[in-house]
Amino acid sequence: MLLRSLRVSKREFEAGTGWNLKPEGACQGDICIPLSKPAGDPVDVRQVANDVGMPLVESPEHGLWALGPASIGSRTLASAEAPELTLPDLDGKLFNLSSLRGQKVLLFAWAPY
Amino acid sequence: MWQALRNELHPKGFELVAVGLDTLGGAGCRAFIEAAKPQHPSLIDQHHVLADLFGVINIPSSVWIDERGMIVRPAEAAPAPPQPGGPTGPRVNLPSELPQRFVEIMGEAAKIKSDAQAYHDALRDWVNNGSASRFALSPEEVVERSRPRDNAKALGHAHFALATQLEMDGHHDVAIPHFREAHRLVPESWTFRRQAWSLEKVIDGPLQRFWQGPDPTKPEAWPYDGDWLADIRREGAENYNEPWRP
């Protein structure tokens, strides 16, 4: 997740990382990781990233931070439940993968290079 | 290239979602998407979130997701199906004489192996038989087969994301060390490498993004340790895709 500030709204953090911030901790599906102190809103990104084990890379002189994914269980997927994916089409219109529930989906990655 | 197979399977409750992984966004993907005229969703992924979320390390690759939103096959190589009427790529005016580097790149690309028939048969079997298909994996197996990731690789993903945004913000030279860190920490990712290489403007013209390597007249100016031709030769084109597992 890319950040322009180390304090972002709870909604933005949850959408960007896929981790939902609940009283019991940061949760994804059945998995919850306890936090050292309850996440507020806005979220203290550095604290939550540290608790969940998401690496943070900084380029403050360009006003940019990037949060890497967590690596629970040493695998890319912690669960077979598909994470939400929201991406734009050519016109910039956002599409949610979850809008295709009820159909079988083949997510196909390609590149023009 | 997927349009015909998608149209065959669409009436059975199947949809294809194509995602172009390119930091240049529409500027890089538009000609290809417009030439393919897709009837399915076709999206742009400038930061390669497909790598973070699903473990995509190569193209072309796929993830299969069932009606309930459960992944039934994690990221794996997805060979293109045969397209009636021939390829649908944009028209590129090739120079009358291809530079030697391209002749060599095309020679290596021809050696890349994929088991297209078995893969497409499996896809049809899954669309017809759903969870009863032997190609639909259990949730445990999906997690088990997803790409290994440790803290170092996760850090590499963060460097890559930062590099893509720096590139988009016009800080090309500042992005390079972060791309290099991503390559060092996630050496198995071809997409992390090819993306960065494709942003170097070594030659002019329509083949610029495919050059992906040093300028032979000043090789010392190339900012990366590897390049497309050197890396595919070192790793072996036959190993570019992992063998398909049913």
Image: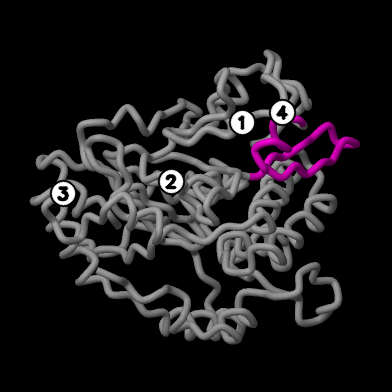
* N-term mark: 3 or 2: 2
- Residue A56 magenta: yes
Binning the other alpha carbons within 10 Å of mark 1 as few (below 14), some (14 to 19) or many (20 upward) gives: some
What is the distance, in whole Å, between disc 1 and disc 3 at their CAs?
34 Å
Check disc 4 and report the residue beneath it: A36
Binning the other alpha carbons within 10 Å of mark 2 as few (below 14), some (14 to 19) or many (20 upward) gives: many
Q: Does the CB distance between marks 1 and 4 fall below 8 Å?
A: yes
What is the distance, in whole Å, between disc 4 and disc 2 at their CAs?
37 Å
Task: Tell me the amino acid under the disc marked 2.
Answer: Val
Binning the other alpha carbons within 10 Å of mark 3 as few (below 14), some (14 to 19) or many (20 upward) gives: some
Q: Chain of mark 2?
A: B
In the image, B34 versus B214, the foreground residue is B214
Mark on residue B131?
3
Q: Residue at x 56, y 23 (%)?
A: A24
> Magenta span covers which residues?
A47-68
Task: Tell me the amino acid under the disc marked 4.
Answer: Ser
Check disc 2 and report the residue beneath it: B19
- Which one is in front in this view, the residue at disc 3 or the one at disc 2? 3
In the image, residue A68 sits, relative to residue B55, either above or below, namely above
- Pinpoint residue A110: horizontal percent, then vertical percent: 44, 55
In the image, B156 versus B172, the foreground residue is B156
User: Is circle 1 on the same chain as circle 3?
Assistant: no
What is the distance, in whole Å, between disc 1 and disc 4 at their CAs?
7 Å
What is the distance, in whole Å, between disc 3 and disc 4 at their CAs?
41 Å
